[in-house]
Amino acid sequence: MRLTIFDISIGGVIGTGLFLGTATALMEGGPVGLLLGYAFMGTMCYCVMISVGEMITLLPVAGGHIKLAERFVDPSFSFAMGWNCWYCWTVRRYIALSAATTLIDYWNPGVNNAVWITVCLVVAVGINLFGVGTYGEMEFIFASIKVVTITGLLILGIVLDLGGGPSHDRIGFRYWKNPGPFVQFDGIAGAKGRFLGFVRVLIQAAFSFIGTEVVTMAAAEMKNPRYAMPRAIRTVYIRILLFYIGGVFVIGLLVPSDNPLLSLDSSNASSSPFVIAINRAGIRYLPSILNAVILTSAWSASSSDLYLSSRGLYGLATTGNAPKCFLRTSRSGLPYVAVIFCSLFSLLSYMVVNTSSGVVFTWFADMTATTGLLAWFCIGVTYVRFYQGLLVQGYDRKHLPYASRLQPYAAWWVIASSLATLLFSGWQVFLKANWSNMTFMTTYLPVMLFPVLYAAAKFLMRVPLVGLSEMDFKSEAEDIDAERCV
């Protein structure tokens, strides 16, 4: 299980956000704006992981950060957080399916997208209905493919930039000079236009990083989680620097921000920035092979998000926050009712039949970024309460299985930066003559629904905040000394 968790923690970092979503980020922010945006979001991701990691290694409870919110904040907060996370995992599945159709259009642009959606749905649902064993094996294969692919792309990108391609064109930092390091968003001149472009990159970067924290959901099923989980958490910064910061740096070197193929709103947006770069270098056959590999990433994301949403719904049902019918399982323990119910929402992916798959990808990416940032905000709040509870009850953090010297400042950074990013998530709709009902709804609807969910649950449950002196740090922590001796 330790190997599986390590694979999930690595493979979960790499997905359609890096392979395909960076196209929009480069087009709207420029190469330097892209790099700064991903670096900014990378600091948030790392702080989220060390925050939830410190809590989950002490208390490896089933339900992960959602259950911890109930223990250290209150049940109403956990209720709102749980449904927000379920919504996030459900919407991310639409992104994977729309990304898959965008990629398949590279080879067969004339085929109706409904065909490819159906094929992808059958694969994702089939993997989940065969049970956790099949899911784990497939995720191991998918994660291995993604890690090998991004590593190879980084090496190839450096070689191409230094003139090692068929054309022997030494690119260097050419595109940082022309069309420039930043993009003047919507033609707005000066620092204002560059800043607004940078903010748009943050939303796309958030979509790419969201989901890294779900590895903690499996802590209760791990063997010796207090040893295995810190190992995965301590390597998060390496994966952020190598895969994401390294990846967007290479993309910014190889593809100019004004390349028309970067626009996912266009009918010919059928490849990732990496594929665009390889095509520009004149390497034959490799673009098709790479697009096929990226397609497996979309399948992996679709299968993984269905697994997470169905298990999340099952978990909500176990705590009484969802109908009890979702508790029904097969003899092997498969929550088939939850899997089937969550699969039905995938039918919304057929929206790409009448709309460009790239446009639908952008809509769902914004929704995922917003709900994911809300989840990060909740993790930050939960950790601050956890930290305060430890102080009040006289616990020494030096004796915890895992503790970071950056706390509690890292948690406060997550709270402040996620709120600021959420505030500006859909700012472009407020520009003159730029209003979009769909953009406003996909970015701000989850932000408006979260306090409504919390207030409604608070009114119905009538349960106060958990007192700092009443927080339970002992349940699920009794065997901590025994594990240290293993």
Image (cartoon, grey):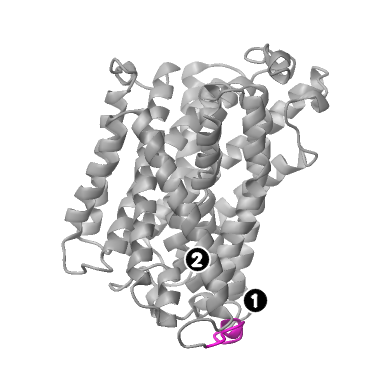
For the point 44% across and 81% down, the residue is: 281
Q: How far apart are the two marked residues, 2 and 1, measured between alpha carbons?
A: 33 Å
Tell me which label, 2 or 1, sits earlier in the chain: 2
Q: Is residue 308 above or below residue 101?
A: above
**Identity of the residue drawn at 66% across and 26% down:** 226
Q: How many marks?
A: 2
Any mark on residue 153, and which?
2
Can you tell which mark lies on residue 399? none
Residue 356 in percent (x, y) is at 27, 64
Q: Amino acid at mark 1?
A: Ala
Magenta segment: 169-179
Instruction: Look at label 2 and name its amino acid.
Output: Leu
Q: Is residue 364 visible?
A: yes
User: x, y percentage for residue 166?
Assistant: 45, 84
Q: Residue 308: name its quadrant.
A: top left
* Left or right side of 346 for 25: right
* Residue 186 or residue 405, whichever sits in front: 405
